[in-house]
Image: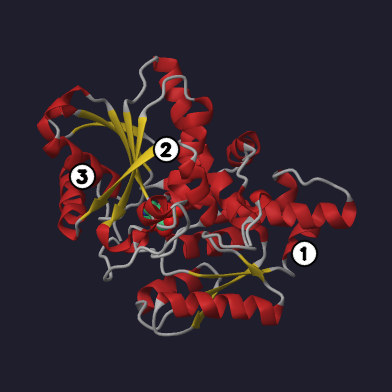
Amino acid sequence: MTDSDDLRFAPDVARAVAFFRSQEAYAVSALRDITGPQGVTVWAKDETQRMGLGAFKALGAPYAIARLIDQAWQHNTGEALSSARLTDSDVRDFAASFTFVCASAGNHGMGVAVGAQAVGARARIHLARTVPEAFAQRLTALGAEVVRSGDVYDESVAAAIADTEASGATLLADGTWPGYTEIPKWVMEGYCVIAEELREVFETSGCWPTHVYLQAGVGGLAAAMAHMIRLNWAEQPELIVVEPTAAACLQASHKAGKPSRGEGPDSAMGRLDCKEPSIVAWDVLERCDVSYLSLSEEEGQSAANELSALGLATTPSGAAGYAGLMQQISRDSAARQMRPLVIVSEGPA
Ligand SMILES: Cc1ncc(COP(=O)(O)O)c(C=O)c1O
């Protein structure tokens, strides 16, 4: 049973913004103007360089880890930790007793490794045997322990959960399911910073997007963005959630009126290839008046090619929001009137 408190998403975005502003590696990511199909001018939020990680996920797990350490420290000592205190030796010694565990063959795993390293904690990442060794090496270079678990992603997720149950380590997933929502909500709170960066730019210029295309895997990014846009953007755009047809779990959930699997073959939009939605993300999106579209594999690839030719090198996952826009422009002759926004969510592999 999921109770409504589990689903409730009420991020403290001021806390997340303050946290990142205190981080040396943080900078507001660029908002680029590109000329899209049929000459439509598109705002592209460029996450390809974010905090040295090369993806927006740098705003998720590292922030959740800082929150978890702060929460545990406060519980023990009564002291709330400032960001500066996180680097003090007494706090790092305390954080060293924490191990953060996840299964990920991508940016979330990197975020957990980076976040744990930043506070002096340990990270253990479960990888399916099919994940290339080069990715495992990137994680170990960040001080994470890598465990090979299972043949496919779902098996590595089950192994990560079993690991935390047996070891007492902390599970740091980006998805949510009944009974497990609190930590991923902090991950999503970190993503809200992207919406705040954008709001400041649009407020200053007085020009707002008419459409925002949000690519989704489990839906954490799309839900964080949709929540913030509906909460405090002065002019309300249409919100379009974009998924691979092979993994359209949020669209399936919307149609079914309950969290549901999106079945399909493996997708080359690997970061979005999530067959199960985050229940928190699904619930947020249900309340944000979003529409859905899904992408063929070819559409994802050609959007990545097009963005790369425009000087924004990315992957089909990173380009999926733009692919959704391309699809809509090709079907709608009035599309030229729009002033759309997309998020280029990662750099090239
Ligand atoms: C580059 C990139 N874009 C988009 C997403 C989708 O984010 P979410 O799973 O929160 O929907 C991910 C998730 O890993 C990602 O790595």
Please identify the quarter of the rendering in which residue 65 is found: bottom right
Mark with earlier residue (1, 2): 2
Q: Is residue 202 visible?
A: yes
Report the side of 110 relative to 339 (left or right): right
Residue beneath disc 3: 307
Residue beneath disc 2: 29
- The foreground one among 122 and 207 is 207
Residue 270 is situated, as x and y percent measured from the top left of the image, at 32, 64
Alpha-carbon span between mark 1 and mark 2:
32 Å
Alpha-carbon span between mark 2 and mark 3:
17 Å
Q: Mark 1 and 2 residues: CB-CB less than 8 Å, in contact?
A: no
Please identify the quarter of the rendering in which residue 241 is found: top left
Residue occupying the point 34% across, 26% down: 209
Report the side of 85 relative to 344 (left or right): right
Residue occupying the point 89% across, 54% down: 77
Compared with 270, 77 (above or below) is above
Q: Name which residue type carries label 1.
A: Asp
Secondary structure under the numbered disc 2 in the rendered image: loop
Q: Name which residue type carries label 2.
A: Ser
Of badges 1 and 2, the one in the foreground is 2
Of badges 2 and 3, the one in the foreground is 3
Disc 1 C-beta below 8 A from ligand 1 = no
Residue 25 is situated, as x and y percent measured from the top left of the image, at 52, 45
Disc number for residue 93: 1
Q: Quadrant of ligand 1?
A: bottom left
Q: Name which residue type carries label 3.
A: Leu
Secondary structure under the numbered disc 1 in the rendered image: helix
